[in-house]
Image: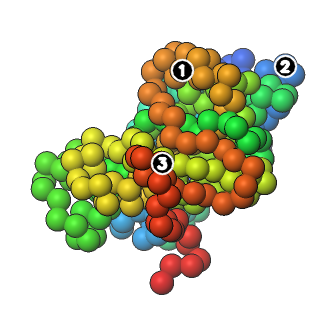
């Protein structure tokens, strides 16, 4: 039987990779982080609860990846460079196979982004994973939700809707072929946080948000906080490769209101289009221009000919589901 301390030592303790940033990692009362001189700390937490954010029995390696990915996505949406993270874990039992898979998925993504596991807490209880990430951003460069301005372009990274399509397949809301599900499922289970793009956009873009609950709702947060509105070209939204093979109505619905994409939606002045494209190229992440910010509040959806659409996309909300 693994004790709490054996478990932490075996699965969550390593020699710090980045001794310049991690002055002291796992094992003391607190970790010590040294942010780069002059930087501001960007801090965010995200919790994943079994039965709510993932299916019971979910693959532990994918779960380790996703738990950190959703947190890194928040840093990306702020334009912040990852420094480190803490992990608060409630587990029903200390199951070595599960722990080995979970820590492998978690730490592989951590290494990919140079984001060190610096501490946490471990307790027995219903499976619950809470990560807090720490990032660095220079003063004035953070991509805040309140920074969109009338005239800005609205951009989207990558593609939208395949995570939602996979969920529809699992829930049998739609019939997917096994090949479609195989192709779409990684978008749901192993999201790619757009860290390189987010940090490349710091100082170029105005506002940004990561799309976790659906584009319409998440862009709505930018609009509200910035006191502006937007027009979106509903048919210009980049659909994921599997969704792209479906009909236009489903493409609109899932690109606008599908959750779990973890792409970035950001706004930038029109005169900085070339810089946005250069940042996307340098980050290796495609971006698509999908609309514009307007002074008049509200989100207006247009079809490919610029005619208004009477769609009312709803986004996901944990407390207002029926
Ligand atoms: P304390 O009693 O001070 O809260 P703990 O006994 O909970 O300390 O944890 C011991 C050390 O292990 C601390 O440095 C803590 O940050 C770290 N730790 C605990 N759980 C985890 C975890 N799941 N992942 C990484 N580090 C952890
Ligand atoms: Mg503790």
Looking at the image, which residue is at 47% across and 54% down? 307
- Residue position for label 2: 37
- Residue position for label 3: 306
As drawn, is 285 to the left or to the right of 187? right
Looking at the image, which residue is at 55% across and 16% down? 278
Q: Position of residue 36 (x, y in %)?
A: 79, 21
Q: How is the image coloured?
A: rainbow
Residue 280 in view = yes
Of residues 47 and 206, the one nearer the viewer is 206
Mark whose residue sits in front, 1 or 3: 3
Which circle marks residue 36 in the picture? none
Mark 2 residue element: loop
Rounded to the nearest angstrom, the CA distance separating label 3 from label 2 is 48 Å
Q: Position of residue 69 (x, y in %)?
A: 50, 42
Of residues 7 and 12, the one nearer the viewer is 12
Q: Tag 3: Cα neighbours inside 10 Å, few (<14), some, or many (≥20)?
A: few
Rounded to the nearest angstrom, the CA distance separating label 1 from label 2 is 29 Å
As drawn, is 105 to the left or to the right of 79? left
Q: Position of residue 132 (x, y in %)?
A: 66, 47
Instruction: Look at the picture and state if 119 lies above or below 251.
Output: above
Of residues 71 and 292, the one nearer the viewer is 292
Sequence-wise first label, 3 or 2: 2
Q: Position of residue 126 (x, y in %)?
A: 50, 70
Q: Tell me where residue 81 sits by quadrant.
A: top right
- Residue position for label 1: 277
Residue 61 in view = no
Disc 2: residue Cβ within 8 A of ligand 1's nearest atom: no
As drawn, is 233 to the left or to the right of 132? left
């Amino acid at each position: 039987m693994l004790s709490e301390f054996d478990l932490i030592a075996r699965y969550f303790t390593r020699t710090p990779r980045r001794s310049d940033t991690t002055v002291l990692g796992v094992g003391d009362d607190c970790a010590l982080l040294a942010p780069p001189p002059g930087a501001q700390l960007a801090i965010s937490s995200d919790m994943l609860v079994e039965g709510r954010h993932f299916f019971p029995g979910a693959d532990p390696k994918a779960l380790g990846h996703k738990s950190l990915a959703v947190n890194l996505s928040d840093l990306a949406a702020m334009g912040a460079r990852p420094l480190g993270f803490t992990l608060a874990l409630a587990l029903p039992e200390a199951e070595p196979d599960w722990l080995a898979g979970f820590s492998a998925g978690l730490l592989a993504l951590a290494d990919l982004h140079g984001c060190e596991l610096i501490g946490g807490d471990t307790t027995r209880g219903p499976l619950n994973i809470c990560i807090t990430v720490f990032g660095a951003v220079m003063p004035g460069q953070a991509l805040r939700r309140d920074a969109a301005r009338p005239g800005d372009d609205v951009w989207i990274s990558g593609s939208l809707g395949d995570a939602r399509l996979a969920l529809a397949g699992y829930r049998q809301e739609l019939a997917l072929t096994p090949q479609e599900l195989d192709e779409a499922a990684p978008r749901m289970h192993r999201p790619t946080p757009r860290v390189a793009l987010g940090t490349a956009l710091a100082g170029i873009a105005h506002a940004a948000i990561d799309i976790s609950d659906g584009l319409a709702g998440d862009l709505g947060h930018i609009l509200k906080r910035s006191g502006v509105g937007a027009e979106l070209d509903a048919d210009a939204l980049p659909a994921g490769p599997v969704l792209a093979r479906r009909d236009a109505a489903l493409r609109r619905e899932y690109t606008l209101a599908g959750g779990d994409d973890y792409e970035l939606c950001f706004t930038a002045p029109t005169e900085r289009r070339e810089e946005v494209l250069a940042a996307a190229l340098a980050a290796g992440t495609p971006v698509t221009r999908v609309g514009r910010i307007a002074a008049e509040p509200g989100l207006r959806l247009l079809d490919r000919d610029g005619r208004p659409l009477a769609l009312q996309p709803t986004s996901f909300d944990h407390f207002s589901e029926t």
